[in-house]
Image: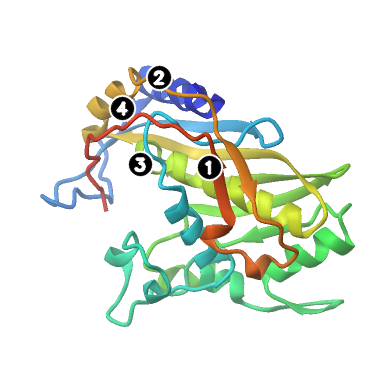
């Protein structure tokens, strides 16, 4: 199995064996089909480390839909969009208004320009500038959790902050996430931000280093528990080789810029219900 498979299974086992149920609490999420409360078993403070120089962190125990994950990543980080009409997948449809907007969330925040001594930059362009001109900086940070705009967001950001850090010629990143639907979204977020580190490193003349994923609330929904237990028995495969097409412009990448070689996965057809 890939290291990502091993770590995913280890995390799932830990949540199921050490987690705490929130069934006695009033919860916001509801099951899409019935409207009933969607309760979880959760652990606080899960931290995972992925060395991107050793392996691309992609699950092989289920299909990861990497191209769709990369498209969503670029929708947020490259297009800086908050409109689902700029996205071919439908994962955000339930959060959008009649115009397709999800409010002042995700890509909108990355596109807001701020004043610096060197001029005006939005958050993404500031990261790109600092990685080239100030790689020793310990201030290369993006933040989507902007309190004055929360009331205008269809959904508060889950993966909300990234800290980039250059060590030698390695680009490292810390992804901070307030909440993680572990079965549905963990592998999605990890692969997305691994791709982001690869892209940022390439256009900055660096090599990918470590992705540190910090999750405040790692949880498995009640309906997901039997599915999670089945996934623990699925046999995986070796990690694929990851390739990113050569490019020196972050804004020129597309989801087709990402390639996997020798990728095998075990089909897992169990449908995972959605909590909203």
Could you give the CA–CA distance between mark 2 and mark 4, rounded to whole angstroms?
9 Å
Q: Is residue 147 above or below residue 60?
A: below
| Horizontal and vertical percent position of residue 215 | 52, 39
For label 3, the crowd category at 10 Å Cα-Cα, with few meaning under 14, some 14 to 19 and many 20 or more, is some
At label 1, counting other C-alpha atoms closer than 10 Å, the crowd grade (few under 14, some 14-19, many 20 or more) is many
Earlier-in-chain disc, 2 versus 4? 2
Residue 108 image position (x, y, % from top left): 52, 73
What residue is disc 4 on? 228
Q: Nearer the viewer, mark 2 or mark 3?
A: 3
Per the model, the C-alpha gap separating discs 3 and 1 is: 12 Å
Residue lying furthest front:
262
Question: In the rendered image, which quarter is residue 103 located in?
Answer: bottom left
Q: Distance between the Cα atoms at labels 2 and 3? A: 16 Å
Q: Position of residue 59 (x, y in %)?
A: 46, 33
Nearer-N-terminus badge (3/4): 3
Which residue position is annotated with label 1?
190
Q: Which residue is mark 2?
A: 13
Work out how far the residue at label 4 is from the one at label 1, CA to CA, in angstroms.
18 Å
- Secondary structure found at label 4: helix
Alpha carbons under labels 3 and 4: distance apart: 10 Å
Residue indicated by mark 3:
184
Please tell me which of labels 1 and 2 falls first in the chain. 2
| Relative height, residue 178 to residue 257 (above, below) | above
Q: Are the two marked residues, 4 and 1, in contact with CB atoms closer than 8 angstroms?
A: no
Query: Disc 3, disc 4: CB below 8 Å?
Result: no
Taking depth in this image into account, of 39 and 76 the one nearest to the observer is: 76
Q: CA distance from mark 1 to mark 2?
A: 18 Å
Under tag 1, what secondary structure?
helix
Q: Earlier in the sequence, mark 2 or mark 3?
A: 2
Relative to residue 252, is residue 203 drawn left or right?
right
Which residue: 81% across, 50% down?
Answer: 206
| Residue closest to the eye, 250 or 92 | 250
């Amino acid at each position: 199995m890939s290291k990502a498979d091993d770590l995913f299974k280890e995390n799932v086992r830990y949540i199921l064996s050490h987690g705490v149920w929130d069934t006695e609490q009033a919860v916001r999420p509801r099951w899409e089909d019935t409207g009933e409360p969607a309760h979880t078993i959760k652990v606080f403070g899960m931290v995972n480390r992925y060395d991107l120089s050793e392996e691309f962190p992609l699950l092989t125990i289920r299909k990861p839909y990497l191209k769709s994950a990369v498209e969503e990543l670029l929708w947020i980080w490259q297009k800086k969009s908050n409109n689902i009409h700029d996205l071919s997948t439908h994962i955000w449809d339930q959060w959008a208004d009649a115009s397709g907007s999800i409010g002042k969330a995700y890509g909108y925040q990355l596109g807001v320009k701020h004043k610096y001594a060197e001029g005006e930059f939005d958050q993404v362009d500031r990261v790109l500038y600092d990685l080239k001109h100030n790689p020793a900086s310990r201030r290369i940070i993006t933040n989507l959790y902007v309190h004055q705009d929360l009331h205008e967001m269809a959904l508060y950001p889950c993966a909300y902050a990234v800290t980039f850090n250059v060590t030698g010629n390695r680009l490292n990143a810390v992804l901070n996430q307030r909440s993680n639907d572990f079965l549905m979204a963990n592998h999605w977020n990890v692969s997305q931000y691994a791709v982001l580190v690869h892209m940022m490193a390439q256009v900055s003349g660096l090599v990918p280093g470590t992705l540190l994923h910090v999750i405040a609330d790692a949880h498995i929904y009640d309906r997901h528990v039997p599915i999670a237990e089945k996934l623990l028995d699925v046999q995986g495969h070796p990690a694929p080789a990851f390739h990113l097409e050569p490019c020196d412009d972050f804004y020129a990448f597309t989801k087709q810029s990402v390639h996997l070689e020798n990728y095998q996965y075990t089909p897992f057809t169990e449908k995972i219900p959605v909590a909203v």
